[in-house]
Image: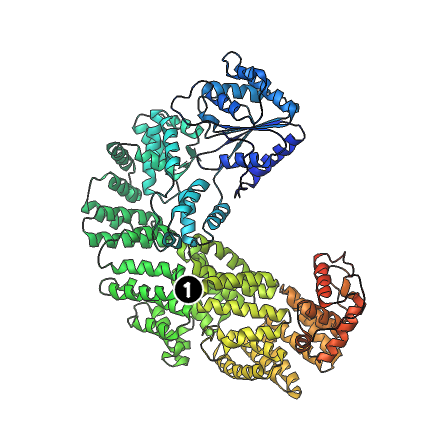
């Protein structure tokens, strides 16, 4: 029993917004004297008690009766009602004891509740009513159905499951709690572990707990730091599940024997199925018929909430329920169930499930059955099913070395099937010393997607050396994985080392051209010959192997053949969706999104990256998630939204730093710099990019550096600083050599634009015209609009205002067409400064009374820029900025830079309702 005066810290109940709203609505009505009744039903651990606690803690307007019955094998008659009376915080009426009299209990309880409700609105909470004695439940149900809503009594009842033969609470309004969804479970684990749980482990916890918040909370409190980080396997079963297993065991014990036998068949049938897919309902029906059971005998389990039959599959309410069932059945009976299922799985197409069921029934090692499982675990069976079969074959193997090899093979199939947690569990069972090369290979794959790239590189190189004598094909795959790790690190020598270890010549001509060509391009041979070898051959884009298609798309990006990269990347994605493996989905989406970014299709790139991000988190691939965040940051730097750009760039940096992902880090920094440029912060952009494009230890990724140069040159030229301009000139010379070799269609225009930015006044116009000519041939709204914006800006600085309007107008239209909102605002500001009226989105604002030049200065100052920084951004003298700023203060009626920033902040939040800050005068402008 719980007193209503107890004060507790409020709970955060994730994923229960609907239930909380229902309770808050009930309490709100109670405060106005309107009563009601609600029954919360839930499986063990789903949080029904937490919801009652929320109601008790949230009600301070009247008395609370809060009772919970302690579990007992034979509850005493009326013990539930006795607990309810004892929870009353105030003295009870004299006849309250009549509630405990068998002949008066139902009516006496109803009268007592009405009496108490007349004094002050009364909240009555009965937690775990299924543990009450039958007499108390009958009296409670009688009173609940007859409560007068006008008497100010709310009755909140919880029960563990719907009792099969007890309808005392029937006919009352019910709310059934389900498991937490993925988002809520993730948020709960992150809060409980302060965000220290690796995504793969978090996904595994969510899956094992099946959305049960009690299990998640208990596990998060007991797991070690290594387990949370994914460096050690999770214990099975998860810690802290004892009480819930006991509750499920009690539920099973309450079911008829025939029902429990059908449930045993369902539990056994899931052994050959991938995790979470349930049991085949047709197979279960045949098993029941073979055992002389009526299939309808499963209905009691459905009514009790133990299983759900969707017509095709039978699903247990929770994995622990299935585990409790199997644990409570004698071994001989379990084996008999497996043998019966094996006999029913007839036909060649069911060979693999049949063998798994036979393996489950085996008593000890069985080498012949193990070999049969290995032979059956081949394509086109799904990866998850092959993993199950190989794991079973390992259990039947007496030789520890052979057992380790089969566990490693099972782990690889689990990885390809999108279950890295299962792969780690299987690898943890490998006891062979030394570990087989296959185990190193899978560990390398796991680290490649969710660990330091340097660790992945070493693991995959080791795996290749161990596999080469007996598994040449997988040894080559390990080297290709090592190449990918070295590429992510930006380590050219390591890339070349991995490529040179691949035996030559390869039997696959496309792979041999890829190996030789990439070696040449990266510096290990003639670059022209390398580019010819890497160039996509007719027919290579139509290959069915997703990995080969991704290599082809990557080679096209290296060459700058952007359209080919997009086309091949789309085919690779389609192949992964159709043929798998699931583990390649985030990579396919990332490759395609990056190619679309290079092509200037930013909206498409964002859409594919947004699809890839949850897939990467679901599959425990933090490194791919970091690359996808970098792509999203680049898209945000174009489409507008400095906050979104910073958020994605920060997410990319949080992984790319610890894991050594130089490419993701370079792209994220580029995105931040481009967002700075869009906002007019050229000096900040130059400061970000200069270390990446200049020689030195902070140099950016070798495959991305040249892409940054046009942004750096623009930023350095607009910032107008001597050292930056000199560094920009050196970068342009290197960019010119790269542009001469690449097939990137934007490179010639970008080179001409860079030279225009650094050219003397008498040459700049011709350089800009040259750039525009290249843009006309290459297409691409965004890059062409940037050149037109810079050209128009330069013309206006040369006081050729009338000529500037054409390029600026074209830039504005192109930015709007490609969704580059912030860039469009910058072009509109330049166009206003050139004397052309441009409508202000959102209606009139406080800056409308200012000239275009004054508006631009006001915006820069509101962002925190000093007078000298504003002068640098807008190519003005500090004295001119100071003069304009004094006039701005006077016109807007503000006294300080702080007031100006506050006024513009209010204007952006409420464009139509902004009033000037009271006061007048021109305060001294900070220099």
Give whichever of 175, 574 is nearer the camera.
175
Q: Position of residue 18 (x, y in %)?
A: 57, 39
Give whichever of 812, 453 is nearer the camera.
453
Q: Residue at x 62, y 78 (%)?
A: 719
> Is any part of residue 711 visible from this angle?
no
> Is any part of residue 418 visible from this angle?
yes
Instruction: Please say if 387 is above or below 567.
Output: above
Q: Residue at x 47, y 37 (%)?
A: 46
Q: Residue at x 28, y 71 (%)?
A: 503
Q: Quick check: 347 left or right of 779?
A: left
Give whichever of 527, 151 is nearer the camera.
151
Pick out the residue farthest to the front: 91
Q: Residue at x 47, y 66 (%)?
A: 664
Q: Position of residue 679 (x, y in %)?
A: 64, 69
Instruction: Please say if 912 is above or below 527.
Output: above
Residue identifier under label 1: 659
Position of the C terminus, as image quadrant, is bottom right
Dot 1: element: helix
Q: Quick check: 36 left or right of 354?
A: right
Q: How is the image coloured?
A: rainbow
Q: Position of residue 610 (x, y in %)?
A: 52, 57
Q: Position of residue 602 (x, y in %)?
A: 56, 64
């Amino acid at each position: 029993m719980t007193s209503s005066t107890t004060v507790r810290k409020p709970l955060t109940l994730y994923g229960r917004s609907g239930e909380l709203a229902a309770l808050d609505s009930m309490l709100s009505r109670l405060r106005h004297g309107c009563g009601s009744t609600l029954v919360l039903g839930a499986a063990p651990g789903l949080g029904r008690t937490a919801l009652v606690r929320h109601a008790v803690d949230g009600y301070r307007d009247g008395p609370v009766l809060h009772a919970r019955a302690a579990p007992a094998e034979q509850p005493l008659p009326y013990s539930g009602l006795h607990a309810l009376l004892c929870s009353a915080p105030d003295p009870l009426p004299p006849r309250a004891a009549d509630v405990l009299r068998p002949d008066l209990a139902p009516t006496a309880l109803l009268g007592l509740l009405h009496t108490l409700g007349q004094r002050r609105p009364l909240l009555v909470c009965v937690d775990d009513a299924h543990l009450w004695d039958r007499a108390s439940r009958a009296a409670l149900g009688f009173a609940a159905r007859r409560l007068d809503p006008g008497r100010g009594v709310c009755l909140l009842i919880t029960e563990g499951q719907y009792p099969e033969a007890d309808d005392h609470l029937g006919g009352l309004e019910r709310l059934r709690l389900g498991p937490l969804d993925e988002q809520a479970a993730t948020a709960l684990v992150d809060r409980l572990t302060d965000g220290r749980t690796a995504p793969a482990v978090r996904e595994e916890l969510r899956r094992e707990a099946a959305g049960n918040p009690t299990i998640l909370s208990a596990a998060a409190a007991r797991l070690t730091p290594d387990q949370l980080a994914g460096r050690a396997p999770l214990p099975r079963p998860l810690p802290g599940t004892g009480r819930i297993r006991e509750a499920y065991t009690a539920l099973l014990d309450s079911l008829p024997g025939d029902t429990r036998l059908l449930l045993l068949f369902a539990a056994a049938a899931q052994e050959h199925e991938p995790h979470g897919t349930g049991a085949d309902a047709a197979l279960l029906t045949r098993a029941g018929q073979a055992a002389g059971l009526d299939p309808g005998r499963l209905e009691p389990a459905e009514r009790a909430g133990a299983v759900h039959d969707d017509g095709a599959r039978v699903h247990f309410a929770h994995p622990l329920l299935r585990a409790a069932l199997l644990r409570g059945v004698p071994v001989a009976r379990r084996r008999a169930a497996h043998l019966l299922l094996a006999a029913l799985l007839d036909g060649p197409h069911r060979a693999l499930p049949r063998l798994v069921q036979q393996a489950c029934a085996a008593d000890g090692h069985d080498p012949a059955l193990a070999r049969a499982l290995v032979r059956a675990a081949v394509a086109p069976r799904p990866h998850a099913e092959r993993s199950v079969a190989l794991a079973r074959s390992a259990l039947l193997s007496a030789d520890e070395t052979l057992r380790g090899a089969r566990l490693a093979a099972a782990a690889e199939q689990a990885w390809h099937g999108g279950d890295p947690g299962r792969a780690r569990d299987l690898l943890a069972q490998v006891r062979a010393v030394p570990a087989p090369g296959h185990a190193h290979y899978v560990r390398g794959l796991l680290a490649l997607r969710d660990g330091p790239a340097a660790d992945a590189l070493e693991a995959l190189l080791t795996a290749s050396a161990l596999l080469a004598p007996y598994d040449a094909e997988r040894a080559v795959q390990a080297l290709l994985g090592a190449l990918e790790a070295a590429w992510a690190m930006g380590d050219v020598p390591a890339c070349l080392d991995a490529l040179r270890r691949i035996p030559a010549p390869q039997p696959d001509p496309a792979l041999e051209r890829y190996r030789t060509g990439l070696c040449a391009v990266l510096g290990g041979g003639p670059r022209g010959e390398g580019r010819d070898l890497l160039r996509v051959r007719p027919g290579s884009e139509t290959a069915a192997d997703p990995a080969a298609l991704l290599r082809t798309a990557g080679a096209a990006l290296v060459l700058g053949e952007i359209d080919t990269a997009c086309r091949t990347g789309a085919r690779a994605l389609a192949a992964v969706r159709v043929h798998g493996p699931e583990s390649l989905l985030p990579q396919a989406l990332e490759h395609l999104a990056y190619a679309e970014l290079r092509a200037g299709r930013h909206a498409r790139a964002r859409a594919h990256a947004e699809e890839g991000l949850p897939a990467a988190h679901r599959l425990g691939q933090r490194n791919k998630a970091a690359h996808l965040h970098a792509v999203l940051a680049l898209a945000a730097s174009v489409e507008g939204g400095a906050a979104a750009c910073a958020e994605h760039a920060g997410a990319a940096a949080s992984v790319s730093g610890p894991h050594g992902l130089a490419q993701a880090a370079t792209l994220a920094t580029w995105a931040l710099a481009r967002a700075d440029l869009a906002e007019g912060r050229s000096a900040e952009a130059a400061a970000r990019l200069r270390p990446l494009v200049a020689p030195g230890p902070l140099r950016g990724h070798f495959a991305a550096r040249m892409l940054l140069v046009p942004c750096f040159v623009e930023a350095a030229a607009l910032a107008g600083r001597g050292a930056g301009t000199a560094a920009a000139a050196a970068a342009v010379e290197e960019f010119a050599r790269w542009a001469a070799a690449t097939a990137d269609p934007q490179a010639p225009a970008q080179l001409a634009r860079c030279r225009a930015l650094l050219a003397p006044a008498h040459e700049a116009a011709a350089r800009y015209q040259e750039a525009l000519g290249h843009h006309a041939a290459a297409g691409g709204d965004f890059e062409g609009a940037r050149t037109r914006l810079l050209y128009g800006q330069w013309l206006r600085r040369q006081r050729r205002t009338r000529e500037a309007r054409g390029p600026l107008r074209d830039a504005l239209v192109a930015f709007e067409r490609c969704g580059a909102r912030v860039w469009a605002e910058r072009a509109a500001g330049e166009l206003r400064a050139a004397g052309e009226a441009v409508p202000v989105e959102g209606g009139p604002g406080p800056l409308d009374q200012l000239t275009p030049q004054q508006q631009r200065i006001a915006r820069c100052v509101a962002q925190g820029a000093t007078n000298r920084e504003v002068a640098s951004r807008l190519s003005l003298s500090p004295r001119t900025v100071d003069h304009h700023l004094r006039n701005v203060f006077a016109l807007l009626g503000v006294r300080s830079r702080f007031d100006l920033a506050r006024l513009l902040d209010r204007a952006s939040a409420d464009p139509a309702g902004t009033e000037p800050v009271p006061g007048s005068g021109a305060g001294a402008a900070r220099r």
